[in-house]
Image (cartoon, grey):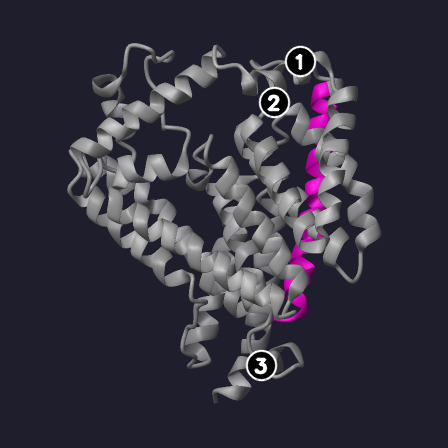
Amino acid sequence: MTLQRVEQLGVWALIGAAGAIQFSIAAGQILTAIAAACWVVTIVAGRERASVPRMFWPLLAYAAFTLISAAFSPQPRISLADCKQLVLFALVPMAYRFLTGSKAHTLVSVVVSLGAAAAAIGIFQYAILHYDSLGQRPQGTLGHYMTYSGLLMLVIGAALARILFGRGERTWALLVMPALLVAVSLTFSRNAWVGACAAAALLFLLKDFRLLAVLPVVAAILFGIAPTQVNARFNSIFNLKDPTTRDRIAMMREGGHMIQDHPLLGVGPNMVERVYPAYRVPEAVEKVNQHLHNVPLQIAAERGLPALLAWLSFVAILLIDLARSFHAGQQRFLAAVALAAVVSMFAAGMFEYNFGDSEFLMLFLMLVTLPFAAGRHEAVGHGVTETQRNP
């Protein structure tokens, strides 16, 4: 197989992974592994120097602090085993190398189209299979409704960015948007609702601030026709007596105590659940929680304040570089897709540890890398390969 064909295989494997991850973590990871092998061969055989966007360096620092925290964890073996997720950060240099030019746009098209199919499955589950309560929610073909709703949230941001800023396929994005909105509503996942609304507000603001008036109208229509269970779930957002709300407030106190006791290294990756009983406050609802349902709080409590600073630096640098790209008119549509992904992740992440979800993280990292990859070395997009430029 020639080097050019290896590169093509890597491109399509990565694009396939972005679509497949919405249905199966196994399929997504297999395709990612194929893309990774092709990336290594392309870099080594082509004698290239691996390059990354600026936001990758604080992400790498976050990974380093995570490994240090795991090494000093009360149970290093358990913590280090949890660190295998850090391998997914390699998606950034892979996407940066492979998804140049129009390939980045192709990935968005695949993600939106397969996201619509995943949404249809969720609607079928709700309407026909009676996945219509908090005990049994639509989850598509995935293992958890939180993962399903988080991925739908990212797809909604990408589809809306295409409607507002895309040059083609706007009609298709507009046609599938109702299914995406209905599906994410039926998951009862309030964090995904918040994240989708935050992404929509940002995209409307970037297009024309007057479009912000559309958001409450759409929300009113959705909740006006929504089932009683969905409306009740929405109203619970503002009810401080709601058990899940009370438990999240309690987790903020518990996480604060963990940070106070372990400010530098945290309690260790994957150790929050194990130390939770020792930090549980009387007003907490659940006896044990797997995580603290808040990304910054979870990172600080689990991995320490230096790790949190590195993660916040990753988010800040990412937002700054994406905003510059958008306002400079460079890859405007893809920058809007990435900005929507970051804002929705951060907003939803105030109520759910979505950055720790492998499927969500995989799609998120690919989407936020797209504008940097598409604009990298314009010659690549015009048929000059990396190997030709670096013989």
What secondary structure prevails in the magenta region?
helix
Q: Where, by quadrant of the figure, is residue 333 drawn?
A: bottom right
Of residues 378 and 30, which is closer to you in this image? 378
Residue 353 lies left or right of residue 127; in this view the side is: left
- At x 72% / y 32%, what residue is drawn? 216
Of residues 208 and 113, which is closer to you in this image? 208
Badge 2: residue crowd in 10 Å (few <14, some 14–19, many ≥20): many
Inter-mark Cα distance, 1 to 2: 8 Å
User: Which x, y percent locates residue 242?
Assistant: 50, 12
Mark closest to the chain's N terminus, 3 or 2 = 2
Inter-mark Cα distance, 3 to 2: 47 Å
Report the magenta residues as a range. Answer: 100-126
- At x 75% / y 59%, what residue is drawn? 166
Residue 54 lies left or right of residue 256; in this view the side is: right
Secondary structure under tag 2 reads loop
The residue carrying mark 2 is 188
Identity of the amino acid at label 2?
Phe
Which circle, 3 or 2, is nearer the viewer?
Answer: 2
- At x 73% / y 22%, what residue is drawn? 223
Circles 3 and 2: CB distance less than 8 Å?
no
Which circle, 3 or 1, is nearer the viewer?
Answer: 1
Circles 1 and 2: CB distance less than 8 Å?
yes
Task: Indicate yes or no whether the magenta region holds residue 26.
Answer: no
Is residue 36 among what the camera can see?
no
Kindly identify which numbered label has been placed on residue 2. none
User: Which x, y percent locates residue 133?
Assistant: 62, 13
Secondary structure under tag 1 reads helix
The residue carrying mark 3 is 385
Identity of the amino acid at label 1?
Gln
Q: Quadrant of the N terminus?
A: bottom right
